[in-house]
Image: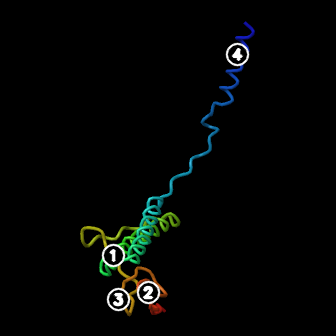
Amino acid sequence: MAFALAAILIVAVVVFTLAIRQKDLPEAVPPSPTAHLEERKKAIYDSLRDLQFEYRMGKLSDTDYAETKLDLQRQLAVVLAEMEKLQGKAENAVPTPAAPATAPGPAKPRPVAVCPRCSTEFFQPMKFCGECGQAMPSAS
């Protein structure tokens, strides 16, 4: 009888010790609103790196490389703009009125800089062209 009582007491102590109470758990970290965009940005950078490698290995023609790189750069610009927009909303937390859409479908971002040598468009200010290496004119 004493043996059974001791066994029950030991089991009760172990269960009580290992039981996790809801109030003892730390608060869950809220998910980042830009987490999915961070993953997409990483995937685009990986694709750009792989594209550069395949081009240097001679697997892509010049036109295929240029078209694919420009498409990936445009996708990256959209992702970065969306991340900045979400981060700006999180910092300001002031609602801003949405701009009226003039045409259906996603709006294409306008280029901020254009290379004077190869006419590559960039969606943020650059010191040098990412395509040909030409120094970009200053925006001042």
Identity of the amino acid at label 4?
A: Ala
Task: Please tell me whether mark 1 sits on a helix, a strand or a loop.
Answer: loop
Three-letter residue code for mark 3: Ser
Which badge, 3 or 4, is on the more N-terminal residue? 4
* Dot 4 and dot 2 residues touching (CB under 8 Å): no
Residue 72 image point, x, y percent? 37, 72
Q: What is the CA distance from the residue labelled 4 to the residue labelled 1? A: 73 Å
Residue of label 2? 129
Q: Residue at x 34, y 71 (%)?
A: 99
Residues under labels 3 and 4: Cα distance? 82 Å
x then y, percent, for residue 62: 32, 81
Label 3 sits on a secondary structure element that is loop
Tag in front: 1 or 3: 1
Q: CA distance from mark 3 to mark 2?
A: 9 Å
Say whether residue 3 is left or right of residue 24: right
Residue 70, picture quadrant: bottom left
Q: Amino acid at mark 2?
A: Cys
Q: Earlier in the sequence, mark 3 or mark 2?
A: 3
Between marks 2 and 1, how big is the CA–CA gap? 21 Å
Question: Residue 7, labelled with which disc?
Answer: 4
20 vs 37, left or right, is right
Above or below: residue 3 compared with residue 70? above
The residue located at (45%, 93%) in the rendering is 137
The mark found on residue 60 in the picture is: 1
Dot placed on the residue nearer the N-terminal end, 4 or 2: 4
Other residues around mark 2 within 10 Å, as few (<14) / some (14–19) / many (≥20)? many
Looking at the image, tell me whether mark 2 or mark 1 is earlier in sequence order. 1
